Image (tube, grey):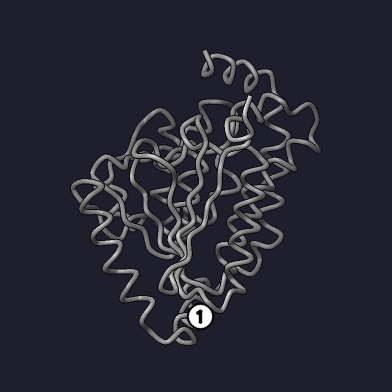
Amino acid sequence: MSSEILNGSLHTIIQNNIATVEFGHPASNSFPGTLLHKLTVEIDNLSKNDAVTVIILKSKGSGVFCAGGSFDDFLAVTNEEQGTEFFSGFANLINAMRNCSKLIVGRIQGKAVGGGVGIAAACDYAFAIQDSAVKLSELAIGIGPFVIEPVVSKKIGKTAMAEMTLAAHEWKSAAWANQKGLYAKVLENIEQLDEELSHFTSRLASYNPEALAEMKKVIWEGTDHWSSLLYERAQISGKLVLSDFTKNALLQFKK
């Protein structure tokens, strides 16, 4: 079995001060722990790269944007330490995205579930298409969106986050996500999305990099406590993923 099938892929292209980072995994662009770590390191590196002013974050293909955490990794957890370590991968990524000195623009070309919603919310600006529905399905498998809750609530508000979380089997439309502020713009199709994305990021990359870096700090004011909060949340999920309810639910989902 190839490394890409097991661990996913990550590719970055830098052109005209814009870094385009593409992650991918055969299982609906879900994240095993190794891929979470690679993307976190890449965001950290780009934050320090003077040749980069703007980051585009996208996923591979034209289907699902991101299905969240890897079910195989969930099922592989045998103790709380392992569970906390896996969910800390999402904490690490969200913290890297908010601490990154560059503005991150999301290309959400398809549906986002669970951790995928968290990644979309952690982008400073996000483009989507009409098919880019969202769902927080964690309660249905016996856990909850604890690690990503702060970033989702910051973007759409606690009430909308709770609405998504408690209706764990229900998809919310891209129009709903746009209205709540998760998506800045929703286009009809991927071709229109890419055209708008190109124009927007080109303009953004032409602005004063120092002003953009200061604006990034303003956008994320009041989140310094996330450097501890998200890891406390990872411990909650790391414990819950060991429950019989969750193990059985994950097996049913895999079938």
Taking the spot 66% from the left edge, 58% from the top edge, the residue there is: 41
Taking the spot 67% from the left edge, 57% from the top edge, the residue there is: 229
| Viewer-nearest residue: 5 or 173 | 5
> Where is residue 187 shown, x and y percent of the image?
21, 52
Give, as a three-letter code, the residue at label 1. Ala
Q: For the residue labelled by badge 1, is the local secondary structure a helix, a strand or a loop? A: helix
Q: How many marks?
A: 1
Q: In the visual, does 189 lie left or right of 156?
A: left
Identify the residue under disc 1: 213
Q: In the visual, does 167 lie left or right of 220?
A: left
Which part of the image, by quadrant, shows the N terminus? top right
> Where is residue 59 shown, x and y percent of the image?
44, 46
- Asked which quadrant contains residue 56, the reply is bottom left
Considering only vertical position in the picture, is 238 above or below 183? above
Taking the spot 70% from the left edge, 23% from the top edge, the residue there is: 243
Considering only vertical position in the picture, is 254 above or below 29? above
- Asked which quadrant contains residue 143, the reply is top right
> Where is residue 62 shown, x and y percent of the image?
34, 39
Tell me the crowding category of disc 1: few under 14, some 14 to 19, or many 20 or more residues within 10 angstroms, Cα based. some
Considering only vertical position in the picture, is 22 above or below 164? below
> Where is residue 154 shown, x and y percent of the image?
47, 60
